[in-house]
Image (cartoon, rainbow, N blue to C red):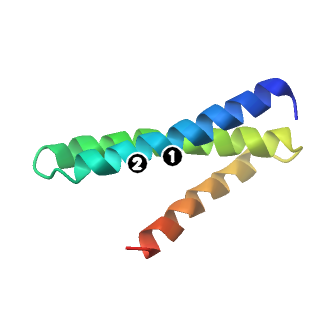
Amino acid sequence: MRPEQKRNTNIGIGLGILVQFAGRLVAGQGGAFLILGVIIMLLGAASFIWGCMSYAEGKGHSKWLGLLGLRWHDGIARQR
């Protein structure tokens, strides 16, 4: 994997997880913060998917295989 792809993977996945967690905390406040929290979580998901796509491309696969990163959310939703 090229250093640029490795960096993009680490930034995308790491930032995506942290931003989604922060969005969950904001949404937990309720009221008007619920919508803001959902927006923050969606931005985190976009970052996470970008990191997954960079990882797949770095491993020699199609970058669209990184869209399987969306399945990660299914596992989280089932834990509730």
Q: Which mark is residue 8?
A: none
From the top left corner, tell me how far across and down residue 4 is, in percent. 78, 24
Q: Residue at (17%, 44%) from the top-left corner? A: 33
Q: Which residue is mark 1?
A: 17
Compute the Cα span from label 1 to label 2. 6 Å
Q: Under tag 1, what secondary structure?
A: helix
Quarter location, residue 57: top right
Residue 66, compared with residue 57, is above or below; it is below
Total numbered labels: 2
Seen from the viewer's position, the closer of residues 20 and 74 is 20
Q: Secondary structure at mark 2?
A: helix
Residue 54 image position (x, y, % from top left): 73, 38
Label 2 crowd bin: few (<14), some (14–19), many (20+), radius 10 Å: some
| Rendered residue at 72%/47% (across/down) | 64
- Picture residue at 36% right of the left edge, 43% below the top: 22
Q: Is residue 51 left or right of residue 17?
A: right
Quadrant where the image shows the N terminus: top right
* Mark sitting on residue 21: 2
